[in-house]
Amino acid sequence: MSKNVLYISYDGMTDPLGQSQVIPYLAGLTKEGYSFTILSCEKPERYAANKDTISAVLEAASISWQPILYTKKPPVLSTLYDFYQLKRIAKKLNKHLNFKLIHCRSYIPALLGLWFKRKYGIPFLFDMRGFWANERIDGGLWNLKNPIFKTIYNFFKRKEIEFLNESAGIVSLTEAGKFEIMRWPEVKINSNKITIIPCCVDTESFNPVLVSPIKQQEMRNQLGITESDFLLGYLGSIGTWYMLDEMLQFFAELKKSVTHAKLLFVTQDNAAEIRETANKYGIHDADIIITSAERKQVPLMISLFSYGLFFIKPAYSKTASSPTKQGEIMAMGIPVVCNFGVGDTDKIIADYNSGLTVIGDKYDDVIQQIVSGIKFDKQSIRAGALDFFSLTNGVKKYKMIYQDIVDKRDAK
């Protein structure tokens, strides 16, 4: 019996998220006997640069790929066009492959999953990835004073309830998100329908044992840092959710007490913007290091950190968010400094003694602990990552969902 699954993503496989949060899971599930076709929207520049690499990775994993080019402008109409393209190709694929499940990553794909379920009776998995409509509001992308955006917001909030009630299964990134969903009176489901799978990490690749001390020293020399520097490290993009000003304020305060502190940004984003913001807080250019890295270099970069740093806007929608960087940093045995009120992050820090949590703008409490020489056990932090963020565990949880939906359905 074929176990063909259509995986629909509005994020591209040539995006970093596609490479860390889609492909590894599907490669693992392919080994469990499921056959995948990925239908994804690719950013033109990233697709042009990375399509050959990603094609090779997917081919090696026996995963089929049907990319379309993402359109950005004009707003709203471009999304409608992308949806039309996804629907057209999905229908065509289903004629040949007779999908047993539509796996929908977030809300735009879930519109398609709901349509397939109602039209053909094919079950869909609502892999929600967060409260998407609320993220658009909290991130300033949709202004509810604009009647068009208000109409779109209300449409997706209605659909959100339909996705939850009519899907064959639901994946939430956080316990906090699941708790919030179960409070909504319109949701008529058993809580067992929601499986918690955080943004997992390939802990085999993110492993401090694999990092060569020689490579570390070469990278320190390249970046202009020494082994004795106290290095705060930020990993990933800047913007929308990440609180650059507050992170730089924290560093400026820390620098007063830890004079050998430096702040390393590993990012593809605009270095000039970071330096301009740092200058506002009296931070010298010599104390800020900004570089980019290929994905395979990221574990090496993290291994240089004294602490990983990330502050995320603690908005309502972030209740359902799981920062990928938290698991990656923990897997390397490095403690984190982050802010309170984002998904399960502070609970994970408490449960696994894996860092320090800043409440509001009360930086002094955390800085004092750093100055006093608080110690963290690297092996214990990594063990926490293996327990909570392991890709192997994530694949096992998805397998259980698939078995419940696909295998039991075939057995009827």
Image (cartoon, rainbow, N blue to C red):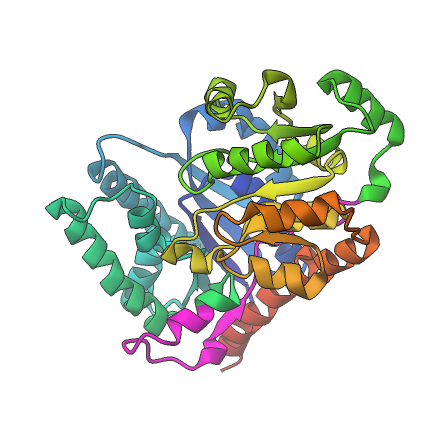
Residue for point 44% across, 60% down: 319
Q: Nearer the viewer, residue 73 or 136?
A: 136
Q: Quadrant of the N terminus?
A: bottom right
| Position of 74 relative to 383 (above/below) | above
Can residue 303 be seen from the camera position used here?
Answer: yes
Q: From which residue to which does the magenta span run? A: 178-207
Prevailing secondary structure of the magenta residues: loop
Q: Nearer the viewer, residue 24 or 131?
A: 131
Q: Nearer the viewer, residue 347 or 362?
A: 362
Q: Position of residue 243 (x, y in %)?
A: 46, 39
Q: Position of residue 63 (x, y in %)?
A: 58, 46
| Position of 138 relative to 236 (above/below) | below
> For the image shown, how many numbered marks are present on the structure?
0
Q: Position of residue 410 (x, y in %)?
A: 51, 75
Which of the 4 image quarters holds residue 28?
Answer: bottom right
| Position of 206 relative to 314 (above/below) | above
Q: Magenta span has 117?
A: no
| Position of 315 relative to 264 (above/below) | below
